[in-house]
Image (cartoon, grey):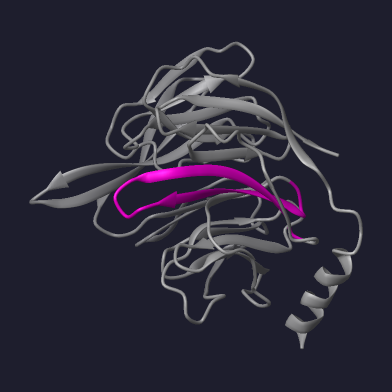
């Protein structure tokens, strides 16, 4: 019943005038070649980036163009997490022992330029999540790191499930009964819905408890909130051997309208959006990075 009401509301909203999303002021970032994995700080003043295979982690000051090397380790650039105030970043590093992959957890403070190891290398999965109030780290030993905001609510992909952090509690939800993997889960700016991708099924939004899951795109990756009703996704076409084409679309949830944001000659690979500044950064197949302004009309 709830799902029927939710779908009806989306249909009703779609009768209204749909928004137009366009890119303005697109420019190439001079931060080297072979760069990928952009990630904006909450206020959009910094952007993290890495290499195509996620080795190392660097930070770009958007205003000055200054680049800071945070770490040079394997996997340091995979899905780092900013603290709510943007003053720290949490990231995992990979190491090998007896042909097994171990990961530790490190925090880096931008004002001091110092790193601190929070978890020693472990074979267990480490889940890091943050929202506008707090950051939590879930490890085999429980919550081991965090900032203020014990009542904060946020989510993180946990592959087989989506981890929902509510205060100091953690719940695992499965919005899709026939899903295989949950990726790139994130909470809407108003904290009411979860956006996620399922590699074989598409892009979805659902309620905070996993209910009322609705598909908003048949395929795509790296979904990002622009505001509470508009998201961006990377849509890739391949032949099983290599990428043939890849674009970035903006999807308005209420109207189901989809708009392509990148030119036909651009092969986009990964993307990040900062809702606070409406900026989007994306990497390309040839190892370049671009930044643009998202304008909603």
How far from the left and from the top, in percent, is residue 179? Answer: 46, 75
At 70% across and 63% down in the image, what residue appears?
193
Q: Nearer the viewer, residue 217 or 273?
A: 217
The residue drawn where x is 66% and y is 69% is 206
Q: Position of residue 219 (x, y in %)?
A: 53, 60
Foreground of the two, 226 or 251: 251
Q: Quadrant of the C terminus?
A: top right
Viewer-nearest residue: 91 or 258: 258
Instruction: Reply yes or no: does residue 236 show up in magenta.
Output: yes
Query: Which span is picked out in magenta?
Result: 227-253
Residue 21 visible at all: yes
> Could you tell me what secondary structure mostly forms the magenta stretch?
strand
Give the answer, above or below, for where 67 lies relative to 253.
above
On screen, residue 161 versus residue 240, left or right, reads right
Q: Position of residue 57 (x, y in %)?
A: 39, 29
Using the rendered view, name the quadrant where residue 293 is placed. top right
* Residue 120 seen anywhere in this rendered image of the structure: no
Q: Is residue 52 magenta?
A: no
Q: Residue at x 61, y 74 (%)?
A: 210
In the rendered image, residue 53, in percent from the top left (x then y), is placed at 31, 37
The N terminus lies in quadrant:
bottom right
Residue farthest right in this picture: 16
12 to the left or right of 246: right
Image height of 32 relative to 214, above or below: above
């Amino acid at each position: 019943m709830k799902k029927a009401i939710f779908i009806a509301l989306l249909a009703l909203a779609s009768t209204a005038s749909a928004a137009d999303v366009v890119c303005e002021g697109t420019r190439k970032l001079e931060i080297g070649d072979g760069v990928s994995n952009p990630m904006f700080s909450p206020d959009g003043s910094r952007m993290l980036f890495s290499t195509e295979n996620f080795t190392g982690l660097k930070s770009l000051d958007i205003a000055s163009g200054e680049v800071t090397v945070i770490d040079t380790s394997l996997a340091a650039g995979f899905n780092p997490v900013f603290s709510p105030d943007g003053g720290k970043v949490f990231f995992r590093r990979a190491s090998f022992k007896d042909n097994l992959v171990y990961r530790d957890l490190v925090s880096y403070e931008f004002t001091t330029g110092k790193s601190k190891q929070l978890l020693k290398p472990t074979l267990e999965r480490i889940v890091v999540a943050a929202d506008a109030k707090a950051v939590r780290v879930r490890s085999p030993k429980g919550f081991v790191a965090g900032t203020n905001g014990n009542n904060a609510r946020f989510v993180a992909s946990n592959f087989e499930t989506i981890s929902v952090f509510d205060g100091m509690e953690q719940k695992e939800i499965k919005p899709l009964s026939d899903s295989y993997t949950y990726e790139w889960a994130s909470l809407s700016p108003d904290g009411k819905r979860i956006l996620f991708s399922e590699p074989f099924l598409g892009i979805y939004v659902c309620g905070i408890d996993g209910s009322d899951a609705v598909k908003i795109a048949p395929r795509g990756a790296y979904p990002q909130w622009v505001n509470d009703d508009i998201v961006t996704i990377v849509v890739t076409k391949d032949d099983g051997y290599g990428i043939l084409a890849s674009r970035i679309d903006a999807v308005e949830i209420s109207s189901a309208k989809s708009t392509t944001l990148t030119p036909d000659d651009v092969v986009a690979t990964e993307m990040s959006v900062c809702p606070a500044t409406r900026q989007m950064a994306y990497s390309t197949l040839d190892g370049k990075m671009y930044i643009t302004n998202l304008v909603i009309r």
